[in-house]
Image: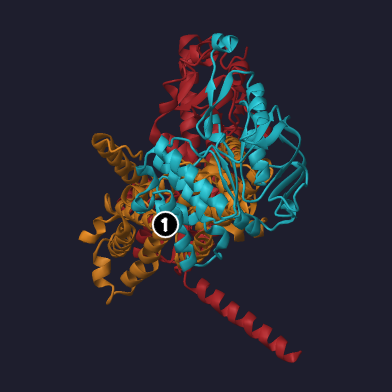
Chain colours: A cyan, B red, C orange
Amino acid sequence: MKGALPVGAVQAHGIRASLGQQEILHGIDLTLQRACWTSIVGPNGAGKSTLLKVLAHLLPYSGVVTLLGQPLATLPARLRAQQLAWLGQSETSAEDLTVWDVAMLGRLPYQPWLGAPSAADATAVEQALRATQAWDWRARTLGQLSGGERQRVLLARALAVQAQVLLMDEPLANLDPPHQADWLGLVRQLVREGKTVVSVLHEISMALHADEMLILHEGQITHQGACADAATHRALEAVFDHRIAIYALGEQWVALPMEDDARVAR
Amino acid sequence: MNNRFFKLLLVLLAWGALTCAALAQPPQRIVSLLPALTETVCALGQCQRLVGVDRYSNYPASVRALPHVGGGLDPNIEAIVALKPDLVLSATSARLGERLQALGIQTLALEPKNHADVQRVLAQIGQILGVSTAANVWRGIDAELSTQARKLPATAKKMRVYFEVDSALYGASEASFIGETLKRLGLKNIVPARLGPFPKLNPEYVVRAQPDLIMVGEQNYASMAVRPGWADLQAIKAGRICVFNAAQMDAMVRPGPRMVEAAHLMVQCVQGLLNRQVERDPNEPSGSAP
Amino acid sequence: MKECRQPQRMAACLGAGLLLASGLLLLFGTSVGSTGFESVLNAWSDPLAWQIVLDIRLPRSLGAWTAGALLGLAGAVAQGLFRNPLADPYLLGSASGASLGVALALVFFGVSPLATHWLVRLGLTGAAFAGAVVAVLLTLVLAQGVQHTLRLLLAGVIVGVVLGALASLTMLLAPEVLQAMQAFMLGSTGLVGWSACVLMVVVWLLCMGVAWLLSQGLDALSLGEATAASLGLPLTQLRAALVLVLALATGTAVAQTGMIAFVGLAAPHLVRSVAKTTHGRLIWLSSLSGGVLLLGADTLARWLIAPQELPVGVLTAILGGGYLLWLMRRNTRASAGTVL
């Protein structure tokens, strides 16, 4: 799949990254298409979050990552921030900021040092907050919200950037099923608008809703393919040691964990 | 060229005039922030010029009636200014010099640390105050010290003294002014000058040195006997300890004209101890070293 | 007044309240002192009373407010930079550095008061400031730059402990400076004149300006360092600038008034207990509340046992600590869920 289409939204060549002394990613090559939702899956410790951070240029790495044709290393920080939004696993301590303020922080890449938020900023923030059903509590502080509500606000922050590429690490944390369904609809809408979405999800069933799937195992990509492909399903089962089984359910696929005796029976 | 020379001459003349003006009028209202300096002013017979002192100045008794303006190191600037002084005397480690200068008050920072300093400070303050008795006062002090020294018998001159300044174990060495007084009196010091004026000693050091005589303040004496190993000290067992009360320690600790009083107290104590020893056993040699 | 209940107006109301309190305390501060209120009454007729009020009490009160404002600002910046509500402005070792600077200066003053001419001109104030700045630089060197906040924090603690130990060692080897050091450690506004006041105001304006420019950066940092980096913020330069502001503000305050504890720690919490805002408004409010806290403590210190004075540091701890204690008890009773 290397360079099959003219310009991939995100391309990576020969990525190696370490955390401390240990090398986590051992030479990754990948191409992610535009207007496509790719989900990265793999066992714990495979390096999924690390890969996402590398693609977002948040960790030191060796190799090249290009964003819409341009190498990330040469892109000025503001431009990169405008084209690439990253939503990480929650490390916020912003208890005192209001929902509006948090979402407005997503517009930082567009604001000058001394400027007040412009009308365009306000519109973007409103759109983002409405999309995640957080508009009604825009005056409440983060400290007053539950885990799921907080996650929706952080998601709105990432949406407010209106970036071409969205990288999301465990975006469904603390979200209840209705809001997980909302998130799915949101991602599909973004893809329809031509954006590129990459997500790391540990809920395999949710991950199977994506267009493409990237399977990571011990720092290397073992499979990249469409989620609807049977080959992808087999690779998925293999990487989890056949402790899961993938079933069709109407139009969708679901993954169910298998207990040992059930596996033997199958 | 000529212009510049004239300007310089004018500046020098002006400075000279101002200095003369300053000298012409010796200060009449003095605030002292260091007990040693208070005592110096009074020793020069100018006690009446003092209008304010720090809270630690308590000698002579007349200064106790003066208004207190805080401590030497945390003075109350407002109180000082309210007294309208011509001159403020302070220790060199006080930060108030610039502040008072900014408020238009002349300050003089002096901190006598040894006998030579006391003589120098007497002369300096005498000159500033416009009195000529400084030299006489020092001669008197000097003569009195010699007299006190003569009062001690020859046997006393062999005594090795340990003067304790603080119970965290700070001793007075030969380099301190207390040490100098002891030397004038002809007594030896177990703490040599090379350790500095007030070294922090290891308690072992004192035990090993086995002083013949211990001089200590009342407050610190209480804890002395219970220090580990100290009960075996010959001086403690034989009771060759000079204990001074707080008022007496004041005189000992301040490097000023009261060192005469300090010497007198020391000599009195030593004589008393020697007499007691003679009473106990007239044949036993006194001031024995192990 | 009723609009103040609304969260949006809370910050503005708090700011107005703090300004009012500052003005009142300033008036009160110039009327208390060892010569009492008569100085103010006689100020028009008596030039001495005029000098006392104008040249001693006024700059002292203003100086107390400004020093408190500097510490409050530094506290807000420290808590935002380290994302830790227990951070205080002395965290990067600046307090210990200042102590060591003063201790060394006192020792050298004693050795030869005339020989070290430049040291005399620098004065103890300059020595304290230089010590604080050197300590922060040492921290930066030890942490190898500002890349990792945790390493910076750890390096700051190490430098603080080591320099503090060196200061103690200096005091032990030269016990004659012990009392002077104690006077410095307890903190006092007694020696603040107009020139010191003006200096502090200039530094405060400078630090405030820089911190306000960077306040959005602080907000972004509170979302997490990775998120802030993903928003295009130059994290290294941001942290370096914030550390500089911290060092400058703390060094100036400590140099002029000695080590006054608790103001930097308590001021941001006092603000947060009333109004929750972004850092842009927090640094202003925290600065104001630091000023009010220190000015109030200083005025009380001069008034309670006049004509004697209490050490200011004791009163800031009692005032600030007492308020925080009351807040904690109120929160646990209400069990609203929000942690202090």
Q: Horizontal and vertical percent for residue B280?
A: 46, 10
The part of the image, by quadrant, that contains residue A207 is top right
- Of B126 and C37, nearer the camera is C37
Taking the spot 32% from the left edge, 42% from the top edge, the residue there is C324
Residue A126, percent from left and from top: 42, 58
Q: Which residue is mark 1?
A: C287
Q: Above or below — where is C241 with respect to B164?
A: below
Q: Secondary structure at mark 1?
A: helix
- Quadrant of the rendering where the N terminus of chain C is positioned: bottom left
Residue C249 lies left or right of residue A17; in this view the side is left
Q: Is residue B33 left or right of residue A165?
A: left
Q: Is residue B240 above or below residue B218?
A: above
Image quadrant where one finds the C terminus of chain C: top left
Is C282 in front, or is A103? Answer: A103
Q: Is residue A32 visible?
A: yes
Camera-side residue: C79 or B241?
C79
**Nearer to the camera, A209 or C180:** A209
Instruction: Where is residue B71? Give x, y as percent.
Output: 40, 49
Residue at point 34% right, 64% down?
B82
Q: Is residue B113 visible?
A: no
